[in-house]
Image (cartoon, helix red, strand yellow):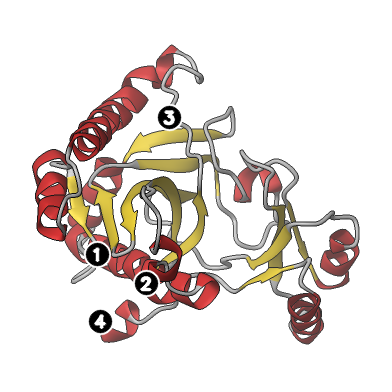
Amino acid sequence: NSHKASAPATLPSFELDDQKQLEQWQRLVLEKPDQHWVLKPCLGGASKGIQIRKGQEALDAQASFGRHSVAQQYLEKPYLGFGGRKFHLRLYLLVTRWAPLGAHLYDDGLVFRSAHEHRPHEQRSEARDAFSSISQEVEALPLADLWNVLDSAGHGTNTSLEVWGRIKEALRNLLTAGTQEMFGTFENVQVGRSFSCFDLLGADVLLDEELRPSVMEFNIGPNMWVDDHGVKHKERLFKVKNPMVQQVVEWAALSARTREPSLKDTEHIEGSTLLHFSRLI
């Protein structure tokens, strides 16, 4: 179990407009020509512009991408115990403050699952294997459906509680060591400011065949609409998003009305309003 818990929090990714990272990725592609890569523009949104390629095809495809694009290792062995199809979790992360860091994970979420059975030896398809929103090819399911499958499948210690704990650990590690490595400390940025900032992030998480989580990406502007995918999905999306948005608004309103709060005041406000969130940091 310690082996499962120590899996990497992210899939190997490379910024292709960074010359050093581009060269590292190119060498890796040549060393492992059978490894698939997901090539995507950073600002595409809703999986627009994504390509899945390997070997020389990946190198050729990369040449057509503009600036601000990434190559991310494709997860070759996903968990298929949830209907035999590929899926990923869409979770919601509220960073209430960056200095000192405070982050909360919403206790509910969505599962985006392909409408097609996953066949590992078939050619990879962007429609079947790389998706981020509801479409004719992708359905949205309650997170509880996945947890029920795990808890009834007899996976030993791979219960929903155990997997949820691994996900929280992965997100916590990314927000602490990961962001510090990329951006440095936020305390220096906050000095002298008369205001603070918060972020509501969408976190897309994959589970491999051993139910180890990998965070694909953070979305800085997750879709909060509930009626943009027809009546079929409206009630389900509303059930997940409405209480979350209400609690975020209550937290923001109370925070704005509190003049110069201490850290103790801030944590009390978070605890009294974010009732369906779990504190990560």
- Asked if labels 1 and 2 touch by Cβ distance under 8 angstroms, the answer is yes
Could you tell me which quadrant the N terminus lies in?
Answer: bottom left
**Residue 176 bears which disc, if any?**
2
Q: Which numbered circle lies on residue 50? A: none
Q: Amino acid at mark 1?
A: Ile
- Residue neighbourhood size for the residue with mark 3, other residues' Cα within 10 Å, grouped as few (<14), some (14–19), many (≥20): some
The image quadrant of residue 71 is bottom right
Up/down of 14 relative to 143, above or below: below
- As shown in the figure, which amino acid type bears the numbered disc 4? Asn
Where, quadrant-wise, is the C terminus in this rendering?
Answer: bottom left
In the rendered image, the vertical position of residue 162 relative to residue 144, given as above or below: below
Q: Which residue is mark 1?
A: 281
Which residue in the protein does label 3 denote?
Answer: 224
Nearest to N terminus: mark 1 or mark 3: 3
Residue 104 % position (x, y) = 26, 53
Instruction: Kindly identify the residue that appears in the image at 59 percent across and 55 percent down.
Output: 119
The vertical placement of 256 against 212, above or below, is: above
| Label 4, label 1: how far apart the Cα atoms are | 24 Å
Q: What amino acid is labelled 2 in the image?
A: Thr
Question: Spatial distance from mark 2 to mark 4, Cα to Cα?
Answer: 23 Å
Choose the circle earlier in sequence order: 3 or 4: 4
Amino acid beneath label 3: Met
Could you tell me how far apart the alpha carbons at marks 1 and 3 are, in whole angstroms?
A: 24 Å
**Residue 40: % across, % down:** 71, 54
- At mark 4, the secondary structure is loop
For residue 215, say whether it is visible.
yes
Residue at screen point 50% across, 78% down: 181
